[in-house]
Amino acid sequence: MMRGALTGLVSLAATAALQAAATPAGAGAQGALSQLGFGYPAGGVSARSLATGGALADADPLSAVNPAAIVLNARARGYIQFEPEFRTVQVGAVSTPTTTFRFPLFMVTGQQSKATFALSYASFMDRTWSNSYPDTQAIGGERIPSTVLTSSEGGIADIRGAVAWSFNERIHVGIAAHLFPGQDRVVAGRIFPDSLQAGGFQNTNTYTFEGAGASLGAVWITPSHVTLAADLRAGGSLSMRLGDSVRVGSGRVPLRYGASVLYDGVPGAVFAVRYSRERWTDLRGLGSSSLGIADATDFSAGAEAAGPRLGPSTVTFRLGYRARGLPFTYLGDRVGETMAGGGIGVPLGGTRAFLDLGLARVARRAADVRERAWIMSLGVGIKP
Amino acid sequence: MSAAPREAVRQVTGKPGGARRVRDWRRALVVSLAVAVAAIAGACKENLDGGPACSAAAALCPGQHVDLRDTIIDPVLAFDSTFSGFPVTGGEFFLPLVNYGDTLETVAIARFDTLITLFSPPGDTVQSVAYADSVYLRLAVDLTHARVPDSVRIDVYDVGDTTLAAGFVDTVPAMLRQRFTPRRIIGGRTYSKIELVDSVLVPVKDSAMLARLADSTFGWPRLRVGIRVRGIGGPVAFRIGSEESGNPMKLRYRPKADTAVHQQEVDLASGDPADREDIRVDLRDFTVVLKTLLPDLPHRITLGGIPGHRAYLRFDIPSWLSDSTTVIRATLRLTQVPYPFGADSDTIVVHPHVVLASPQITDVRRASTFLAQAGLVVGDSLSVTPGASGVREIEMYSLVRGWAAQAGAANAPPRAVVLAVGDEGTIPRIATFYSTTAGPGLRPRMRVTYIPRVGFGTP
C-alpha cells in the first residue's frame, strides 16, 4: 500500500512537472519594484492562504511552507495553482501597466498510516520580465540613438520533498529537503535606427542556479480551539553559474522561520495571524556587489468562514491582510508590500475536487515609485 | 480517534442550510466563477513591456546597459596592394576623353572592322559601295563629372594599320601614340560648350572613308579610328558611351548621292585577335592613355585616376575579437594624403567592395577582381576631394561580423576588401591614403566597439 501511494505521488509529480514545462512561463517586466534583483518571491502560498493574506500559510497543507502541515491534507491529493498579476508602476507622471503570469505552485501528497508525504514545486524567485525603451548609447565617441530590448525569463524554483509524522491527532511534526534549481535566460539587445553606423545586437546569457536546504515544522492542535504551527527553513549553499560551467556567484538559501496561530472557537470560522522572518541577506554574494538586499518580516492576519453547503461540502469565504518586505532594495530603500484581499473555496464534484479563488489588491512602495497590482490566484485540487 | 481537530483546521464547516439558500449560493457561485473566467481571459492578453518605467526611473532597471568596450586595432591590415589598369582594356562602361595638356591625355579607339560594302537602292539590285558622302562618327556624350571649356576640338584619327607592320598592336599606348599625327587626321570639328550635349556627329572625310572601303588588305574593308579632344581655353574631360553602356559610337555614311538611298550605319566590330572572341568583343572600343605625368606616390594607397587604380586591403583582425565578442561598430580609419592634381570641386566617391575570391586564388591582383557589388555588406562609402587630407572613416561592422561568422569555415574568403572609386577608370581624379608601411599614427587602423559575450544580466 505504501508502495502504491508513493507511485501515485511520483506520477502526479511528473504530470505536474510536464505541465509546468509545457505552459508558457510568466512574463512581466523589470522596471517594477517587485521584479528587482533575482525577482519576486511568491512565497509558496496556496490560493487559500493568499486569500487570507497568508495568515494560514504555516498551517495550510497546500502551501509549501511548513512540512508538518501536510498531515492536514487529504490522504492523496494533487494541487495546481495559476496566478496572474496585473500591475501598474507609477513613476511621477509615467504609468506603466504590465501583466505577469505565474504558475507558482504544484503539489502532490500521499498518506500512509501516520506518515504523510508531499512533493511540491514552488516558485522561489520569479525573474521574468521584458523591456523596450528608447535610449542613447555612446559608441566610438558619439552618442547614437537606440532602442533597448532586454528580457529575462525564468527564476529559481523550490522543490520540496516533505515527510510528516502524526504522533496523535493533535501533534504533528514534519521535515523536508529542498532543492533550489533554476534557470534565467537573460537577453540584452539594442537596435540602432542608423544601421550603417552601428549594428544592432541581441546577446543571450543563460544562468543556472543550484542550491539546497532543509526545513522542519510542527503543528499542535490544542484542545482550546487554538492551533499553533511553526516552521524553520535552514539554507545550504546557493550558487549561480553562467551556462553549465562558469560560477558567477554564490550565497546561501535564506534562513526563514515563521509561525501561524489559528483560533476556531467561533463555530464555522477560523481566525489566524502569522509572523515570519526571512534572512534575505543570506543571498549576498549570489549577485553583484551592488545589489541591495534587506532581511524582511512578513505579518499577516486573516479569517476563513463557512458559507452554505454545496452537497456534502461547504463553500468557504476568506479575507486577509498582509504586510511584508521584499528582499531587494530600491536606491537603498526597503520595498514594502501590503496586500488586502479575499476569496472563496468551492467544492467541485462532492469532495473529490475543489477550487480556491483568491483576489488581492497589492501595493508596493519605495522612494518615489509606487506600484499597485491585482493578484488573482486560482488553485485547483484533485483527490484521486 | 476523533477526526474533529484535523477537520477544524482543514476546512471550516458551515451550518446546514435550506434548499433555497443552496440554490441562491449556487447562483452566486456561478456568477463568481464567470467573473473569474472573464478575468483570466483578460489576463491572457499580456502586456510585457515595462520600458516606460525604465525611461522614467533608470534605477528600476539596473543591469540593462551592457558593457560596451572600445579598442583600436593598429595596424589593422596585414598588407595592402594598389593595382592600376581598371577596368580592363575594353571593359570601360564609358570612354573618357581627357586632355589636361602635358599632364594627362586619353583617347578612345573604335574598331569598325566590318565596313558595309554592298547596299540596295530602292527598286534596284544590290550594288557595291563605290561612293561615300556625309560620313559622320556619332558619339554619345556623357557629361557626368565633366570639365568642358568654352570650345572643344574633337579630331578623328585613322589609327588602323594599312601596312601590316610587324608587331604593331593598337592597344599599346607607345605604339598608338605614333599614329596620332596630323597627317592621320581624317575628320573633326570644333564644338562650342552648348553643342556638346547628348550626342554629337563628328564629320569624317569622304575620301578617307572611300579609301578604307576600297582597301582589302585584311580581307575585308575596315576602319579603326582614334578620338582625341582638345580644349580651347582650358583642360577638357568628358566621357562618351561605349559598347558596354549600350550607347556606342556609330559610323554613318551615304553610299550614293541619291537622297532616296538610305544612309548606312556601321556598328563596332573587331577582327582581332582571331582566336579570342571574348577579347575581340572587348576591343571593339577602348581607352588608351596617350600621355600621363601624374605621379605614382610610393607607400600610398592610390585610388581612381585613368587608368583606374584600386587597392586590395588584407585585414588582420585578432581572433579574440572575432571569436568571442559581438562587434557593434567597426570603423576603418584611413589617413588621406593630398594628391597634387585635381580641383577642390572634384569629388571622388570611394566604395569598399568585399572580396569574394576563395583562398585558392593567391594572385592578389586577380583576387581583387572577384568582388561583391558596392553597398553589399558594407554600405558605407567615402566622398573626398583629391587635395584634401585628414582621417577618413568607413563603417564596416557588418563585414567584421560576417568574417567572425565564417571563422573556421572551409574555403572562407580572405578577410579582404578592395577600395575602388565610382566610375572607375573614367574620371581623372585620384585620392591617396597612407598605406600599412606608414607610421603608427598614419597607417590604416580600425576602431572597434564590441560587447564581450559574457558579463551581463547578473542581478
Image (cartoon, coloured by chain):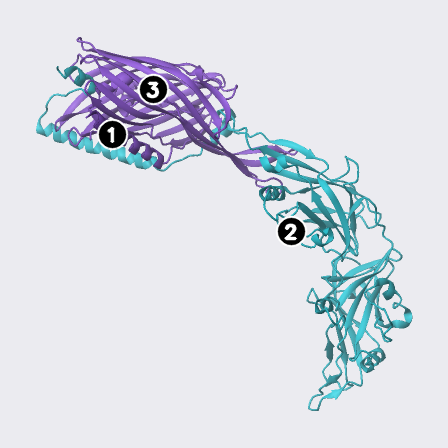
Badges 3 and 2, same chain: no
Answer few, some or many: residues within 10 Å of disc 2's Cα (few below 14, many 20 plus, some between 14 and 19).
Answer: some
In the rendering, what colour is chain B? Answer: cyan
Answer few, some or many: residues within 10 Å of disc 1's Cα (few below 14, many 20 plus, some between 14 and 19).
Answer: few
Q: Position of residue A78 (x, y in %)?
A: 25, 29
Mark 1 vs mark 3, CA separation in Å: 19 Å
Q: Is residue B413 visible?
A: yes
Q: Is residue A261 visible?
A: no
Compared across the picture, whether B139 is left or right of A131 comes to right
Residue B39 sits in which quadrant?
Answer: top left
Q: Report in which chain the residue with disc 3 lies.
A: A
Mark 3 vs mark 2, CA separation in Å: 61 Å
Q: Report in which chain the residue with disc 2 lies.
A: B
Q: Amino acid at mark 3?
A: Ala
State whether residue B47 is above or below residue B277: above
Residue topped by disc 1: A7
State whether residue B442 is above or below residue B85: above
Residue topped by disc 3: A177
Determine whether the residue tagged by mark 2 lies in a helix, strand or loop: loop
In the rendering, what colour is chain A? Answer: purple
Seen from the viewer's position, the closer of residues B63 and B135 is: B63
Mark 1 vs mark 2, CA separation in Å: 63 Å
Residue topped by disc 2: B358
Task: Give the residue drawn at x 82%, y 47%.
Answer: B339
Compared across the picture, whether A162 is left or right of B8 comes to right
Task: Give the residue drawn at x 14%, y 16%.
Answer: B4
